[in-house]
Amino acid sequence: MSKPYSQLRAAFAVSKASLLAMLRSPTSVVFSLLFPIIFIVVFGAMVDTTAVNIRVGLAPGCDTNNLIYKSLAKVKILHFVSYDSLPALRQELLKGRLTAILNITPDSDVPFLPHYKIDLQSSSSSAFRAPIVKSTINDVVSEINKRIYTKNLSVATLVTGQLPGRVYKTIDFILPGQLGFSLLMAGVFGSAYLFFNLRQSLVLKRFFSTPIKRSYLILGEMMSRLFFQVIGFIIMVSLGYFAFDFTLVNGMLTFSEMLLFSIFGLIVFMGIGFIISGMIENESSIAPVANTITLPQILLCGLFFPVENYPAWLQSFCKLLPLTFFVDGLRKIAFEGTHIWQMPVQLGGILVWAVVIGVITVKAFRWE
């Protein structure tokens, strides 16, 4: 005698099969689970997306044992750094890496009472954030005066000054990031889809019957895409320079060095795309796998906001990513006038990634 049909068991069977199908689909896993997790981790780990992160250099000999400095050190938006010499501090200030230089010294002109002189030096490159530092210092001094000095006296005198320098505009931060974004997406997605389609249409299999080596085949495809992306690079930089006054410190020399450095970066990004195309089995898996690699870099590598907004443990990871080396290098060349051979960290990092990815690319290459 046959058992009666159970609607409940059928519902459970359908549910089980559907769940297994979703777990086996890279698209479902990535878009339903991985992407939300990445967004939560990235934006949840940020200290405060609305807070201002201001780096202030301490001049050599600055008194850090007084009440004024101890009160300023408690202000969350201020981050104090020390350098060995005043010229090094001024160079960092002129390059826009510091907002101001602070020097607190005892003032001997005021007898009988503890009094300090606060010297605050800023530059044109920090014109937007320097007033915040000045206002913060005034607030701290005013608060100390209310608690200690009750008869119209002040614990300190603030003296401000400004060094001449280039104005650091928003476009100087945004454009290198957008160049990195463009080359990353074009290199990874374009190369991944290209090589997969060549393999799927048996074009690579036909190449296999010829004497060409796979390393040269990869090189040929890279050269064609390099040429196309160079055109896009020229258009974007020209638009930023002529329409939005993007800073090119040394003119055409700076432009040429940015272009050369971009070629190194594009080689790395295209290599990632070639690796993806060699590892996946169907075209529908390209997008989720490529997004899994590119999205964390887009969010973590300073394209839209500074890496310093993240906690220290996350910054260490961000600084090892290829897109971070690339974008930081472009910003140094464009605004600071740094030559390629003068930034060993960025150049060395991108070259190491190029070698590693190049070796993996050749190993992962498949004719069919």
Image (cartoon, rainbow, N blue to C red):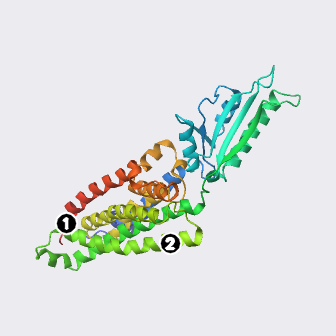
Q: Is residue 123 above or below residue 102?
A: below
Q: Amino acid at mark 2?
A: Ser
Residue carrying label 1: 215
Q: How many marks?
A: 2
The residues bearing labels 1 and 2 have C-alpha atoms spaced at a distance of: 34 Å
Q: Which residue is at the front of the view, 26 or 197? A: 197
Nearest the viewer among 147 and 64 is 64
Q: Position of residue 109 (x, y in %)?
A: 78, 25
Q: Which mark is in front, 1 or 2?
A: 2
Residue 343, image x, y percentages = 41, 50
Residue 12 visible in rendering:
no
> Could you tell me which residue is drawn at 79 percent across and 36 percent down?
142
Identify the residue shown where x is 44% and y is 61%. 295
Left or right: 252, with 58 as reference point = left
Q: Quadrant of the C terminus?
A: bottom left
**Residue at label 2?**
238
Amino acid type of disc 1?
Ser
The quadrant in which the N terminus is found is bottom left
Cβ–Cβ below 8 Å for labels 1 and 2?
no
Image quarter of residue 108 = top right
